[in-house]
Each structure stands twice: as C-alpha cells, then as structure tokens.
Amino acid sequence: HIRENRPVIRQLDEGAINRIAAGEVVERPASAVKELVENALDAGARRIEICFADGGKTLVRVTDDGCGIAPDDLPLALARHATSKIDGSDLLNIHTFGFRGEALPSLGAVGRLTIASRVPEFEATEISVNGGQVTAPKPTALNGGTIVTLRDLFFATPARLKFMRTDRAEAQAITDTVKRLAMAEPFVGFTLRDVSGGGEGRVTFRADAETGDLFDALHGRLARILGAEFAENALRIDASREGLHMTGYAALPTYSRGSAVAQYLFVNGRPVRDKMLYGALRAAYHDFLNRDRHPAAALFINCDPTLVDVNVHPAKSEVRFRDPGLARGLIVSGLRHALAEAGHRASTTVAG
Ligand code: ADP
Ligand code: MG
C-alpha cells in the first residue's frame, strides 16, 4: 500500500517551467516594462517608446531603434536560457542589463507576446507566443529596430491576475520604472504613452535625448525628471576610491524631503534598491540634516563588473559588492566632502 501513495518524480514541461520562472521575473506590468526597456537599451537603442493600456494589464508595447534581431534568431529569443549577451564562461563579468535569457520566454508563457524586428540584411520578421504556444515566424512591415508587444499579461495564470492592483496604481509603477531607467540613460530619448481606449493615446512622460558632456546631460535629464528645483539645488558629485567611481547629483541639505522618496541609486547603470547603499546615503548627510529630513540624490556607482555581483536577485534590484565597506566609504566620504565644500562656499560668500 505504501507504493500507491508514494510520490513520483516527474520532469515538468517547458510551459510549466516558464510559468514558474515568470513568477520570479514578472511581478506586474511594470516589471515587463523594465525587462523590455532594458532589452532595448542592451540593443543600443537611441529612442525608445513605451505604450501601455489599462495600467499595462491589457497592453505593453516597447518600440526601439536598436540593432534588431535576425529572423533566424527570433525563435531563440523566445527560448529559455538563450541569450546573445553572455556565453556563460564568466558570470562575474557582465556588461549588459540582461544575461539570463528568461524575460521573453517568461512573458510569452504568461501573456501574448509578439516580437517584430528587422536587421538591415533581412526582411522584417515577426514571431508570436501565446501562453507558451509559439507560432512560426512570418514577414511583417518594419523599417528597423524592434517592436515587442505584450497583451493580456497573466491571462495564462489566473491566480496571478488577482494580485494586480488598480490600473492607476499599475500605471504609476510603470511611470516610476521608466523614469528610473531614463535617469541612467540621458543620451537616450524616452516617450511613455497611455493608449487606454485606443488611438494615439496621451503622452504621460517624455524626455528627449540630452546633449553635451555626461554631467550636462545628466543634469538636464534630472531637471526633467526630478524637477528644476532639484537641479538648481544639486551638487555635482564626482568621487573615486580604489576602482569604484561615484558620479551624479546630490541636493543641498536645504532641499531635503520629509521622506526618502527622492533617492535614486544605480550600480553600473542599473537602478538598485539596496539597504546598504541607502544607509550610506543617510550616514553621509547625518551631520547636515535633522533626523526627520531625508536627502535627495541621484547617484551612479560604477566599477569593473567583477567587483560587484548583480546576480543576487532575480529582479536584479539588489547587488553585492565584493567589498561593501569600500562602497559605503566612497558614498559617505564623497558626499560629505561635496557638502562640506558647498557649506564652505556658502559661508565665504556670505562673509564677503
Ligand atoms: P536576456 O536579455 O537576458 O538576454 P531576454 O529573454 O530578455 O534575455 O532576451 C533574449 C534575447 O533576445 C536577447 O539576448 C537579445 O539577443 C534578443 N532581444 C530581446 N529584445 C531585443 C531588442 N529589443 N532588440 C534586439 N534584440 C533583442
Ligand atoms: Mg532581457
């Protein structure tokens, strides 16, 4: 009788595996937007347009002018663990946003995904996958770049559907995601359009490609996203320590906030929400701010990819530095130095 009840081990099919992976990679429409925009950036896009309808639940579409996907590669783009970005030999040396080869198969497993793409040498081609069912590639009309359309996210996983919030809340999360990504890419133009109800829709965020040197471009982009007042009160940050570099803008203590809403941290171009880094930011302002005030800053930590592991979290918003103390020290000392200098400048100006 033991035999009848004994569980048997079976290999899950590809569809089930992809739906499970989707649970980690795609939490809500904004995570789909993040994956698709990161793919466009990895493809070298200079202009990216994001459309969504009904908070992204019924439609997310990302159009880019990047390098495109060759027709023969389209089925591979939908295959699990297939990527053009790494060869697997050096997981500590990653220079792109993507590397897992999971986003597109995951999205195709839980929604209806169509990829239309064109590389100069071939005709434009499109491929679709609906809840894991892939259709054969066919010709389409497109001048260049890639258009990825995701409809009916989570239609194939009804339990997940229930976890989505209101259209308004999901739209807000999409906007936040796009703004965060746009901060780190000032030379790329972004347009976000709400096309709920059809037609041309309504542009809800737009940032044209900035020009000038990196600091000029970043300053312009931050003014666009965080507002002119932040930009006017922002100190240029440029500090280095043993192979770690920090650039960006941090606001004067007088432009502090009542909550930590205006803190944007990036590691090698990726938006991260990392406790250790937030803690370092708070520590840097400790002597300059009251306890109930929070600094505003957009800081970009850059280093050799081998000095930081971005492989910690499936959604890739946590990072692990090889030497966390070094990262913390750079942030604290770099910011304190800039704040002290600004204070010194202010007091000497007043003194005459
Ligand atoms: P990853 O980004 O981790 O490689 P994805 O599933 O997101 O995995 O994408 C799979 C592959 O499809 C990528 O490695 C890339 O070659 C190709 N691809 C996806 N989106 C684009 C795009 N917008 N432009 C060009 N190539 C793309
Ligand atoms: Mg990707």
Image (tube, rainbow, N blue to C red):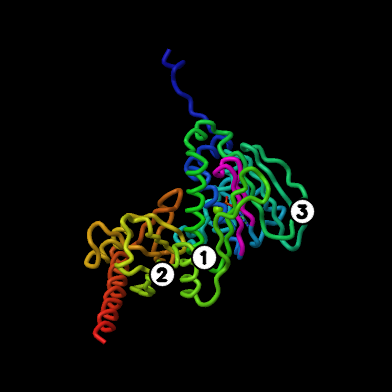
**Other-residue count near label 3 (Cα within 10 Å), few / some / many at <14 / 14–19 / ≥20:** few
236 sits to left or right of 35? left
User: Residue 62's x, y, as percent?
Assistant: 61, 53
The answer for how far apart the CA atoms under marks 1 and 2 are is 12 Å
Task: Tell me the quadrant of the picture where the C terminus can be found.
Answer: bottom left
In this view, 53 is above or below 96: above
Q: If you read the primary sequence from the N terminus, does the residue marked by circle 1 or circle 2 appear first?
A: 1
Tell me the chief SS of the magenta region: strand
Residue at 61% over, 65% down: 46
The amino acid type of the residue labelled 3 equals Ala
On screen, residue 61 versus residue 170, left or right, reads: right
Q: CA distance from mark 3 to mark 1?
A: 29 Å
> Which residue was labeled with disc 3?
141
Which part of the image, by quadrant, shows the N terminus?
top left
Determine contact: label 1, label 2, CB under 8 Å. no
Q: Position of residue 66 (x, y in %)?
A: 64, 62
- Taking depth in this image into account, of 274 and 313 the one nearest to the observer is 274
Label 1: which residue? 185
Residue 26 sits above or below residue 334 on the image: above
Relative image position of residue 139 (x, y in whole percent): 77, 50
Kind of element beneath mark 1: loop
Q: Secondary structure at mark 3?
A: loop
Q: Which residues are magenta?
A: 47-63
- For marks 3 and 2, give the one nearer the viewer: 2
Q: Give the labeled residue for mark 2.
A: 248
Q: What distance separates the C-alpha of mark 3 from that of mark 2? A: 41 Å
> Which residue is found at the position 49% from the left and 33% from the top?
162
